[in-house]
Amino acid sequence: MWLHEKMAEKITDTRKRIKGIVKTYGDQKIGDICVNHIFGGLRGTDLLICDVSYVDAFTGIHFRGYTIDELLDKLPKAEGSQLPLAGGMDYLLLLGDLPTREEALAVEEEWRQRGDLPYHVADMLRAMPKDTHPMTMFSQAILALQSRSEFSLHYNNNLKKPDYWKPTLTDSLNLVAKTPAIAAAIYNIKYHNRDLVPPSQQQDWSANFAYMIHKDWDDQYKDLCRLFFFIHADQGTGNVSAHTAWLVNSALSDVYFSCSAAMNGLAGPLHGRANQDTLEWLLGIMDEFGRCPDEKQLEEIMWDTLNNGKVIPGYGHAVLRNTDPRFTAQLTFGKERFGGDELFKLAELVFKVAPKVLQEHGKAKSPWPNVDAISGTLQYHCGLEEYDFYTVLFGVGRVMGITANLVWARALSAPLERPQSITLDMLEQRIDKVRQ
Ligand code: NMX
Ligand code: MLT
């Protein structure tokens, strides 16, 4: 397949590069591990290599070296839209090159041919209890596709190690192709108890989600899908979901096992579920006041939230120390299209007040908004009021980057990840020894 051929060239070069680095500098020290790293969730340790994307503390995400603004300008656009084709983004994440329009459309076409949801997945989703969280459904649906894994099939038939990436790329294309249909199935089954709509052959991958949830008429929502899936596509391999996938995949578990596990991490309130929690919090404020409160009232609400031992959802970050550019991209989208919306005004006001309050509170290392501070507000404005669903949308975007990383993991024979654990006694002995 054409994408496999293009990847093969890149992989050969990168393998040589890594071989050279390890051969020449294998013993070169590049950092230190302190006790604080062990007890601080490994923050501040450069322990992973990821060329697909990089998160800078101040300028945020760079996809293959490009910022969000650069890519909004440079990536080929969807028909009749100013927003990028996800096919172009996947091409960039996998290969590291900006795609031409033809190349972006060719990835879209690959997905179009692979995008149908097998009956057994839809049946399984329908059989799940109605109060099942949509992220549980999403993770299970991905896992239910595992029986189709090309990697597992070929591995069982003596696939050679240098070729592991090939069926991994096929799995990656197949899974990404189906994620809009999985998400739409969850939405249609859980909230509307209605028939599923098969993906359209006419829509681009992002817009197809809108089409399958009966919003084919809504061009604004299609654009929001294009923006949303694009900005959520990757965030290095250190975040909980991507790192989970990386770890699981290091045992040679295929893309489906790895991505299903990743989505279980994304479902946590400190990670992707913050978009659900943010909207719930904002709607609670709107309910209390019947409108957007004034600055002073909002400040009081924030202090109440903090004094009750809760976090301000959507604010702070493990790595970022500035406003998340994914927040800014969504803020701009909302301002241009529905700036007068009361809920949107509230999200804007939170942006004005929260950093000040969090700085005064003095705990969070970053008082600035992350991607989740506004994403639910845009979804809600566009008619998706079922906010416990929003993390599924985060997952649809994220699977693109995670799978690109997994193709590279297999291409570069990323080893079984297995750090050593030591006991507290051993740690104290080690500290004594080093201090002597
Ligand atoms: N509101 C109140 N307190 C906060 C916040 C916040 N938004 N952010 C951090 N803190 C507290 C944090 O709970 C911790 O308190 P304690 O010492 O009592 O445990 C202290 O500040 C230091 O935390 P940090 O080192 O700044 O943050 P950390 O790297 O541990 O966690 C987050 C990062 C993102 C989990 C944290 O900022 C947070 O809980 N934010 C709110 C939830 C959120 O928006 N999550 C989404 C992240 C993005 N994503 O999509 O994954
Ligand atoms: C993400 O997009 O994965 C989040 O911002 C969390 C992170 O980067 O750790």
Image (spheres, rainbow, N blue to C red):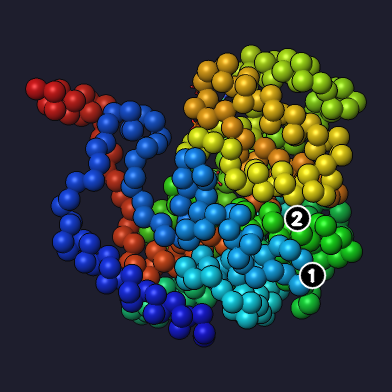
Q: Position of residue 196 (x, y in %)?
A: 82, 66
> Mark 2 falls on what kind of element?
helix
Q: Position of residue 316 (x, y in %)?
A: 56, 32
Locate the C terminus and report the quarter of the image it occupies: top left
Residue designated by label 2 = 224
Left or right: where does residue 163 sit relative to residue 119? left
- Disc 1 or 2, which lies upstream in sequence? 1
**Mark 1 → mark 2, Cα distance in angstroms:** 14 Å
Q: Which residue is at a point 84% across and 27% down the rendered structure image?
A: 292
Is 285 or 175 nearer to us in this picture? 285
Residue designated by label 1 = 80
Decide if ligand 1 comes within 8 Å of the CB at mark 2.
no
Residue 323 sits above or below residue 4 on the image: above
Q: Position of residue 203 (x, y in %)?
A: 77, 72
What's the amino acid at mark 1? Answer: Gly
Mark 2 nearby-residue class (10 Å; few <14, some 14–19, many ≥20): many
Residue 291 sits above or below residue 193 on the image: above
Q: Residue furthest left?
A: 436
What's the amino acid at mark 2? Answer: Leu
> Mark 1 falls on what kind of element?
loop
Left or right: where does residue 362 sit relative to residue 13? right
Q: Position of residue 118 (x, y in %)?
A: 69, 72
Q: Would you say residue 19 is visible in this rendering?
A: yes
